Amino acid sequence: MYTTENLKKKLKLIEKEFLKITGKPFLPSPKDISLLLNWLEKGVPLWVIVEGIKAGWEKRKRRNPSIFSFKRYIEKAIISYRERIVGSENRVIEKENLMIEEISNFLKNLPSELEFVKEIFEKALKILKSRKKEAQKMEILERLESQLESSLLEKFSIDGVEPSKTLKSLRIKYRIPRLLRFYY
């Protein structure tokens, strides 16, 4: 729910953008206000509404533009926005499933000389399978990745060889999976 002050700020922003796009003042009707309130209460970001206004103006330049007159273009922008969100959520799930599969396979075939990192990968699996918020998962996985790299370097560091090269060769030699999603 929006406070009156918060709503006024959002309407001011829409008014400003509306003027920029159409060159005409924003004089909202009760229908316009009702539509805007409905979209805002459903969590539609302002930029999506503005995107719809732009599309509507490009297609149908009118003497008296209004939110109501651009309703179908704004609703198309909302649908597009929601599809992008769902698509990105699906990609996250796909990547996490791939990570789970790679880590599980790695643990099944864990070389004895890497037994000391087993616990790190078991924790990573537990986190990936959990229902924690995305930000929490990423934070924990970043810590585990850092812990993994430190453990590997502590055990296998070679004088005169850059740590990044050592880690790269170990990852290739033992097929050590990454614990961060952006590598997938």
Image (cartoon, rainbow, N blue to C red):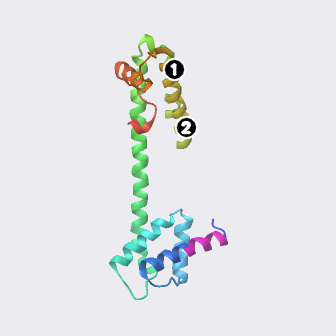
The percent position of residue 131, horizontal first and vertical second, equals 54, 39
Residue at 52%, 74% (x, y): give it: 14
The percent position of residue 103, horizontal first and vertical second, equals 42, 26
**Residue interval drawn in magenta:** 4-12
Q: Is residue 134 above or below residue 162?
A: below
The percent position of residue 22, horizontal first and vertical second, equals 42, 81
Circle on res. 139: 2
Residue at far bottom of view: 63
Q: Is residue 5 magenta?
A: yes
Instruction: Tell me the amino acid under the disc marked 2.
Output: Glu
Instruction: Tell me the amino acid under the disc marked 1.
Output: Ser
Residue at 41%, 18% (x, y): give it: 108
Q: Which residue is mark 1?
A: 151
Quadrant in which the C terminus is drawn: top left
> Which of 32/63 is in front?
63
Task: Calculate the distance from the C-alpha at mark 2 to the C-alpha at mark 1.
Answer: 18 Å
